[in-house]
Image (cartoon, helix red, strand yellow):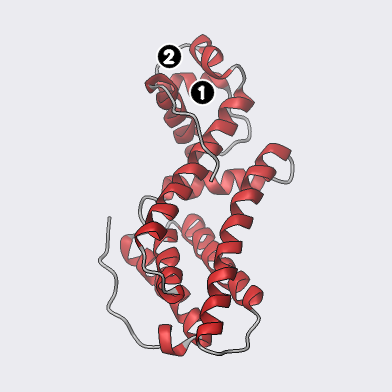
């Protein structure tokens, strides 16, 4: 994970305001004045801290991605060395309320939608996706070796990644993002893994504690 400079309290306020605006309206057509109104400040305050709207929006994407990676890395640091347990932890993170809250999903969708048009968004989103995918491929390959299974680790990892993204899109489009629905999405991912690793994911498990 890239080291991100610490934001000042004022910069954090502006980033939070921009994130709220993007979550409500997407990226198309929003202005610096929209963000300034949300933050309760003048256009000049935003210009002083971020120079341009484009820099502010990229900083919002960086903040979202860095927060996701921090939660992910913290969870992995406390997890055991077992590849199965580490895969389970990664699934848990993707449906953690700090990651999969409706507001954050809306902002992710907004940036993904613009990634093909804005090279800076595409670069940041691609870097994050490739890093996380590589981690999943490594863990799937390690678990397959541990279980002496011959499987396509890349295909299984991409399948899991696609299910996670699909659950995020479904939650965003339908608005069905309650704690119970996030737990259901988590179980869908574990069921997929159970098709390849029945010894590790094939048995029904007690549902994770539902977090608001």
Residue 27 is situated, as x and y percent measured from the top left of the image, at 60, 36
Q: Nearer the viewer, mark 2 or mark 1?
A: 2
Residue 6: percent from left, percent from top: 44, 28
Check disc 2 and report the residue beneath it.
41
Front residue (pair 44, 78): 78
| Residue 11 drawn at (x, y percent) | 44, 22
Point out residue 91 in the picture as x, y percentages from the top left corner. Answer: 44, 66
How far apart are the alpha carbons under marks 2 and 1?
A: 10 Å
Please indicate whether residue 61 sits to the left or right of residue 184 in the image. Answer: right
- Residue with the mark numbered 1: 34
Of the residues under marks 2 and 1, which one precedes in the sequence? Answer: 1
Q: Are marks 2 and 1 in contact (CB under 8 Å)?
A: no
Badge 1: how crowded within 10 Å, few (<14), some, or many (20+)?
some
Q: Quadrant of residue 200?
A: bottom left
Label 2 Cα crowd, 10 Å radius (few <14 / some 14-19 / many 20+)? few
Q: Considering the numbered disc 1 on the image, is that residue within a helix, a strand or a loop? A: helix
Above or below for 92 versus 100 = below
Name the quarter where the C terminus is drawn. bottom left
Question: In front here: 73 or 156?
Answer: 73
Q: Residue at x 37, y 50 (%)?
A: 98
Q: Is residue 60 above or below residue 209?
A: above
């Amino acid at each position: 994970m890239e080291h991100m400079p610490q934001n000042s309290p004022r910069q954090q306020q502006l980033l939070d305001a921009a994130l709220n605006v993007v979550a409500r309206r997407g990226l198309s057509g929003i202005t610096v004045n929209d963000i300034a109104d949300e933050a309760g400040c003048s256009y000049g305050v935003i210009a002083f801290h971020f120079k341009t709207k484009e820099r502010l929006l990229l900083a919002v994407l960086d903040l979202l991605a860095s927060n996701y990676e921090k939660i992910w890395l913290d969870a992995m640091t406390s997890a055991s060395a077992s590849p199965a347990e580490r895969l389970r932890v990664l699934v848990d993170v993707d449906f953690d309320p700090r990651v999969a809250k409706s507001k954050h999903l809306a902002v992710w969708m907004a940036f993904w939608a613009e990634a093909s048009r804005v090279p800076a968004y595409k670069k940041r989103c691609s870097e994050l996706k490739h890093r996380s995918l590589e981690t999943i491929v490594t863990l799937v390959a390690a678990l397959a070796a541990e279980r002496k299974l011959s499987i396509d680790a890349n295909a299984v990892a991409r399948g899991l990644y696609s299910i996670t993204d699909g659950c995020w899109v479904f939650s965003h489009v339908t608005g069905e993002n309650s704690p119970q629905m996030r737990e259901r999405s988590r179980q869908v991912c574990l069921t997929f893994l159970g098709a390849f690793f029945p010894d590790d994911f094939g048995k029904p498990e007690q549902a994770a504690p539902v977090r608001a």
